[in-house]
Each structure stands twice: as structure tokens, then as C-alpha cells.
Image (spheres, rainbow, N blue to C red):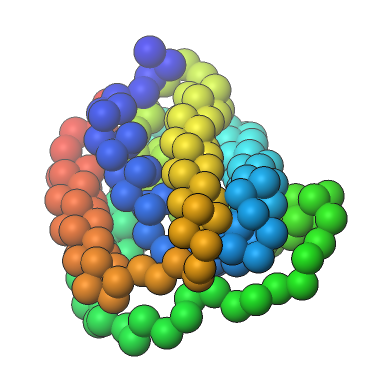
Amino acid sequence: MFGIHDLPLFVVSGLLLNIMPGPDSLLIMTRSAGQGWRAGCTAAAGIGAGTMVHIFAAALGLSAVLATSATAFTVVKLVGAAYILYMAVGLLMSKKKDSAAVTTALPALPYRKIFAQGFLTNVLNPKVAIFFLAFVPQFIGADASNKALAFIVLGCIFNFNGMLWCGALALTTAKASERLKLNPSVSLWLNRATGGLFVWLGVKLALSKQH
């Protein structure tokens, strides 16, 4: 449907990426710990809105450049596969980090400002845009009739799963009644598991015939 393929692999990869610690998770945890789960969920909503900006910008830009060229689309997919392998190497080479407090107390803010903070944290992160341009096209066939629509569908699936994780993180952090710390060993093996998956995904996509 929509020229999308390997959807289960996309969902699993996306969930692993969302679970990995990053600036978005840190913001949600600090707000949840300091102001409760509603503040954490508000930050998550802002992050989700920022993600949608990246999704639509990437989808429309990709469509405008590649709408008339299946060859160019294939080139983008191969470059994206190379980028995925690059990320995989970084994850596999990651080392255990000292688990000092991963959150820092922040002053209380109105919910509208927390939402804006989450939105800007995500939408101003260029790595998110690069990720969508490299990752999502791997699951869209070169012969898809509407690549922009397929991109948006996959992006929405990714964002929906991400919001489920962010909501759970906000609730868990608030319920814990203390700063949530990620065990460094868990973080290390999560990085390596994701890196191994990305090696397999990158090689598979680089060597397989284009859909």
C-alpha cells in the first residue's frame, strides 16, 4: 500500500530509535520530575509537533526533487543506507558512560511554554531532518505512485509510536518521584543492539534490488 514495504522492520527500528536516550527524552524526564506527568506529556506533545514539521518538510522536498526521477530516488536510498551504516558504527563503538544524574532541576513553566520548549528542541535539531531523509525512503519503493504520501504515512507511524513512548516515559518519571536514571549497562547494550540492527538493515538495503 502506498508503495511502502518492510513495514514491520520500519516499526521495530523506529521503536528502538525512540527508546534511545536523547535531548527529547531528557526534556520530558526533567519536566515530568519537576512538574508532574502533565508537564512531561506537554513537552512530548511539543516534540511530536516538531517531528511533524520535519516529516512534511522532508516529504515535500523529497517529492519536489525526485518526482520525475526513479534513478535519483534510488541514489538517495543508497546514500541513506550508507548513512544508516555510519550511525550503526557509532552505536556499536559506544562506551559505557557514567550514570550521573541525567536530569537537571528546571524552574516551573506554564504549559504553553513547555510545549514551545519541546517543539523548538525537536524542530531546531538538524539531526532529525537528516534522519528522516536517510531512513524513511528506505521503506518506499522507487516505483511508488506518490512518494510524498508514502513518506508522510511512514512519518506519522514513526511519530505515533514515538508519542506512545514519550507518554510512558513522562508517566514513569513522574510516578518514580525522583530523577529517573538509565542504567549505563542498559544504555550500552541498547546502543549495540540498535547498531547491530542498523548494520543488517543498511547492508540489506544497499545490496537488495530496488522496489
Residue 151 seen by the camera: no
* Nearer-the-camera pick, 170 or 129: 170
Whether residue 156 is situated above or below residue 111 in the rendered picture: above
Q: Position of residue 64 (x, y in %)?
A: 62, 35
Residue at horizontal 30 percent and vertical 27 percent from the top: 7
* Nearer-the-camera pick, 142 or 54: 54
* The quarter of the displayed image where residue 204 is located: top left
Would residue 69 be found to the left or right of residue 36 on screen?
left
* Nearer-the-camera pick, 64 or 120: 120
Total marks in image: 0
Would residue 142 be found to the left or right of residue 60 on screen?
left
Q: Position of residue 40 (x, y in %)?
A: 62, 52
The C terminus appears in which quarter of the rendering?
top left
Whether residue 151 is situated above or below residue 85 in the rendered picture: above
Q: Position of residue 148 (x, y in %)?
A: 55, 28
Q: Position of residue 114 (x, y in %)?
A: 76, 56
* The quarter of the displayed image where residue 71 is located: top left
Residue at horizontal 24 percent and vertical 57 percent from the top: 194
Whether residue 176 is situated above or below residue 5 in the rendered picture: below
Residue at horizontal 60 percent and vertical 57 percent from the top: 32
* Nearer-the-camera pick, 76 or 13: 13
The N terminus appears in which quarter of the rendering?
top left
Residue at horizontal 50 percent and vertical 25 percent from the top: 153
